[in-house]
Amino acid sequence: MLSISITHHDGIARSGTIQTAHGIIETPNFMTVGTLGAPKGVTPQQVIAHGGQVLLMNAFHLAWRPGEERVKRLGGLHRFCGWSGPILTDSGGFQIFSLPGLRKITDEGAQFASPVDGAIRMFSPESVVDIQCALGPDMAMVLDECPAFPCTDAQLSGAVERSIRWAERSYARWKELAPPHVNLFGIVQGGFDERQRRRSLDATAAIPFSGLALGGFCVGEKIEDTHHGIAFTAPLLPADRPRYLMGMGTPLDIFHAVAHGIDLFDCTIPTRNGRNGLAFTSVGRVRIKNTCHSEDAGPLDPNCNCYTCTTFSRGFLRHLLLARELNAAILVSLHNLAFYFNLMRGIREAIKSRRLTVFAQEFMARWAGEDEGEGNGEED
Amino acid sequence: MLSISITHHDGIARSGTIQTAHGIIETPNFMTVGTLGAPKGVTPQQVIAHGGQVLLMNAFHLAWRPGEERVKRLGGLHRFCGWSGPILTDSGGFQIFSLPGLRKITDEGAQFASPVDGAIRMFSPESVVDIQCALGPDMAMVLDECPAFPCTDAQLSGAVERSIRWAERSYARWKELAPPHVNLFGIVQGGFDERQRRRSLDATAAIPFSGLALGGFCVGEKIEDTHHGIAFTAPLLPADRPRYLMGMGTPLDIFHAVAHGIDLFDCTIPTRNGRNGLAFTSVGRVRIKNTCHSEDAGPLDPNCNCYTCTTFSRGFLRHLLLARELNAAILVSLHNLAFYFNLMRGIREAIKSRRLTVFAQEFMARWAGEDEGEGNGEED
């Protein structure tokens, strides 16, 4: 089963390795989103070649299409999607409450209409564990209830208590199934109320999950509230288990959360923005369609060694984007992922040499203060 | 400048190498189409890794967007598109007569409205040489007049004579510019009239072009007439220069044309069909969306060693296609290109061991007789 070894600290920030049945993850790390089994526009081969170590997929979406039993018959998730490294599957708790199609939610679970063909299916804590055990990732997430924002105290408290009950049922089912390499993670909810966060954290941490995640952020609140909530909750997470901040990650978010002890991130930002020609670079964001790049023979990012930056000019990438060529999406997405992998490598090295604060300040100064946080918590 | 060395014959079929300033091309070979400077959905790195040796681009399209002078300022075509191997640019003669926007055609040239912004520009034999010399490919094509099908004898004869006059003017301009590594190819027209083909061939071959191409096929005629025209004309092309059959290439077309002495091909078939989920395999065409592939754990092509076939199952590729994932287009296009590169390698080896006929028969038997010729002569 999964184990984490923290080898370095820099304040609350920490660095080490998570060992899974499919290889190690150096932490802090960024998980490449491949919702349906494939990062959009980038092959697993390219992810590995550029330093990606772990993929994130979505059990809820995969359950509808192609179906977890089909994935299982096709050899399980790793074989199915051509990725032999670690995989985490999200339970789809976030989607259940953010996507249209929810019919009815009770303590039993969430009744949902298929986004593919409209068929009705019940997603219960148990069935979501079953689905993920059939898929066979290295890390699986419990089903949780992610309350809307804003909501009443009663609604928030109700969601926290239900999520705790669901976490206990999820763990019981997982223990019963005892899947060979699938580790189950709990999710801390609680919105922006410190008492509720604490209640959720204590109850979830009391269950011997393999890791713990922070959920319920980026649901419509101000970014200050997000960061305050993370700063409050993250350091309270058990130190002996991986800590995963779900679905968010602008560079600023990552620096902030790492400084408060987070190990794992995932976000659609690199690929979703890549498809639209927004590049993340060491000198800030570059909107490659802008006219100023039309005759720029330099790379997207002068400090990047990815295939895109070592091979193509900004002028060429702009040309591809304007011509709506498929390779524009591919090449900018690839660079953006490489940017994130390099960012995480830099963060790990900074923690190891106890200079995370300086590294973050220098990075954000080059980033020119810009940080709109686009894409947090969104579907890829 | 370019040179060709034919080292083996098998009947009229021939194999050897074309030396360009950017490397050699083993012949017969298939040029990967990257109309605007990029193969659709496949990176230059992936093309090389799978055995591709030469790219084809379109000077007419590049002249409109991003403009040949911009490409030149960005370092020339090779630097611009991130491909250091040989490149051939088509003149756009075919597009001028097949795409909407033609305003007026005279002996001077073709007046054309931009497909990008409607601007009017004259494409003359001289300006098309100028454009290509600014772009800087290894092989450039003259502007020719490709008559419609069917057309009258007078129209056919008029197009042939005009193409001959244009070929002479193109060559004169090319000689005057004396570009360091750009070789100019003539194009033989003449429709489906043997006397006209002969007249066009004799007059074009009399000009010391670096290579000669067959144009004017796949303009609406029956495939029997195409193949008859190629069988008649190809063997008459000068043996000491590369012979290029423009814009067509089903496997059957390629076997037929190679057997009649053709060295070079290009076609949008692999990438255009790849994007729609039609795979070319050693056991025939596979429509990967078909239900029969939904639980098929085997590769697209059991005899292929491409990234797609060594990594992913048919079931996974079908899942990606149904979910309209970007990687479906990427992975099937990549396989289809690898299929073509492997096909050409097989053909070269068969010629070298004088067993092309048997190789073709065995291949086409596995191909199960199917050959609709989709995509010949079409825009990518």
Image: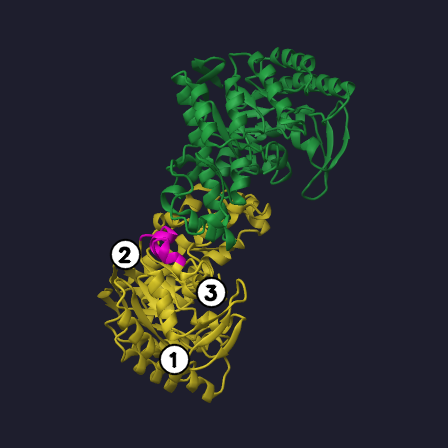
Chain colours: A green, B yellow
Q: Indicate the secondary structure of the residue bearing disc 1.
A: helix
Q: Mark 3 points at which residue?
A: B369
In the image, is residue B80 part of the stretch drawn in magenta? yes
Task: Name the residue nearer the viewer: B191 or B290.
Answer: B191
The mark closer to the camera, 2 or 3, is 2
Q: Are marks 1 and 3 on the same chain?
A: yes
Residue found at x 38% / y 38% = A302
Image quarter for residue B161?
A: bottom left
Q: Indicate the secondary structure of the residue bearing disc 3.
A: loop
- Of labels 2 and 3, earlier in sequence is 2
Residue found at x 64% / y 11% = A202
Q: How crowded is mark 2: few (under 14 residues within 10 Å), some or many (20 or more)?
A: some
Q: Position of residue B358 (x, y in %)?
A: 33, 64
Query: Which mark is drawn over residue B22?
Result: 2
Question: Main SS of the magenta segment?
Answer: helix
Task: Name the residue nearer the viewer: A14 or A220.
Answer: A220
Q: Residues within 10 Å of mark 3 (few under 14, many from 20)?
A: few
Left/right of residue A35 with respect to residue B378 in the rendered view: right
Q: Where is residue A23 in the image (x, y as percent from the top left)?
A: 43, 25
Residue found at x 27% / y 67% = B14
Give me the chain letter of mark 2: B
- Residue stretch in magenta: B70-84
Tally of marks = 3
In the image, is residue B38 part of the stretch drawn in magenta? no
Q: Mark 1 points at which residue?
A: B163
